[in-house]
Image: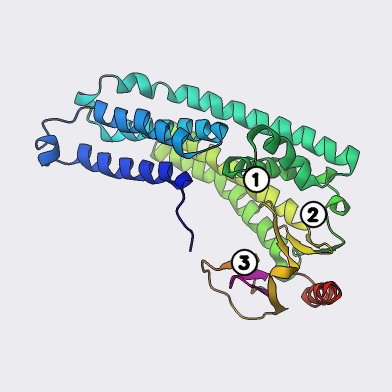
Amino acid sequence: MPTLTKKNIPLISFTVICAFWAFFYQSSNILNEYGAEKPEWLLLIDGLIVLPILCFLCVKDKKEATIKTVAYSCLIILLGSFIIPESSKVAWPYLESLRYLAIAAFILLEIATILTVFFAVKASITRNKDPDIAISQPIEKILGKGAISSLLSFEARIWTYALFSKKIKQQCFTGNSHFSCYKKDGAQSNQLGFILIILFELPVMHMLLHFLWSPFAANITTGLTLFGLVFFIAEYKAIAIRPISITSKSLIIRYGVWNPLEVCFTEFEHIKLNSGFIRRSSNVNRFNLAGNPNVEIKLNSGKYIYLGLDSPSEFIFAIENLRVKSL
């Protein structure tokens, strides 16, 4: 069970602020004199002054604290635009206009991510560097290791495999032995099916929304769908390129475009074949797209990892040999 830390305080405070002030502004009760007093400055102080202070007090990394402050402030402004009555808004309309700056910042971030991808891929080709390290290293050098850098590495990986997948060589990945997972139960073929379905329904959905709702809604929905399509295309390509690898001391699980997971053999309690259906659970990590996973790994912590591999028996044999040698 995850434990709460000082770093979680801003997120908890943000959730409480959103819930309390949404109730305050959207209801009539004794707190707001039964709807007569709903001033905007109450949310402004809590959301745009107190919450940023908490971010800088509770997050040691000041870059991460700044990013969280900007993100929470944008969300608070968006929340206020919906819940604060129009008659109570004085400064809020000016704050709402800042959303254009947020959009511009998002576009700049996307451009920076794509440029990072370009140079990362170039570095991986010229130096035969592990592509995962080539992508994450420039981001971590700027932002340090953390949730934000992990998220940006994930996004950078999406653009890498969507745009430059042919430049990535499987033999460049770290590991002595590599195993694939894209053939099992037609995993990659199923992904291609999803991509074709999205492409087929996209123009139809756009036209329906355009005429039945509004052109703006149609454009927004189409844009988000196209962004999701980039993810599916990247996942489709990555699952055939990024291997699940074995080093002399650990297992490196790469699955599609998701961030890699490295587990030392010393953490293994057992590894065996699996054939049954595995339900989702807090102590279960599943790396399997189609059918039932065929490899079960139980860790000393009590957690389970389930994999869907093309050659599960060979994979287990290779790991057991390395575990025996290390004893």
Q: In this view, does 72 lie to the left or right of 151?
A: left
Q: Which residue is at a point 69% across and 40% down the rendered structure image? A: 159
Q: Which amino acid does label 1 sit on?
A: Phe
Residue range of the region highlighted in magenta in the rendering? 295-308
Q: Please give the label number shown on residue 286.
A: 3
Q: What residue type is labelled 3?
A: Arg
Dot placed on the residue nearer the N-terminal end, 3 or 2: 2
| 15, 193: nearer the viewer | 15
Q: Please give the label number shown on residue 241.
A: 2
Residue 157 placed where, x, y %?
70, 44
| 23, 202: nearer the viewer | 23
SS at mark 2 in the image: helix
Residue 120 higher or lower than 201, as above or below: above
Residue 46 higher or lower than 242, as above or below: above
Q: Main secondary structure of the magenta part?
A: strand
Q: Which amino acid does label 2 sit on?
A: Ile
Residue 270 placed where, x, y %?
70, 78
- Front tag of 3 and 2: 3
SS at mark 1 in the image: helix
Mark 2 is surrounded, within 10 Å at the Cα level, by few (under 14), some (14 to 19) or many (20 or more) other residues, namely: many
Residue 83 placed where, x, y %?
27, 35
The answer to which image quadrant residue 253 occupies is: bottom right
Label 1 belongs to which residue?
Answer: 154
SS at mark 3 in the image: strand
| 79, 209: nearer the viewer | 79
CB of mark 3 within 8 Å of CB of mark 1?
Answer: no
Mark 3 is surrounded, within 10 Å at the Cα level, by few (under 14), some (14 to 19) or many (20 or more) other residues, namely: some
Dot placed on the residue nearer the N-terminal end, 3 or 1: 1
Q: Which residue is at a point 84% across and 43% down the rendered structure image? A: 167
Q: In this view, does 66 lie to the left or right of 323?
A: left
Q: Distance between the residues labelled 3 and 2?
A: 19 Å
Task: Evaluate whether residue 310 shows in this view.
Answer: yes
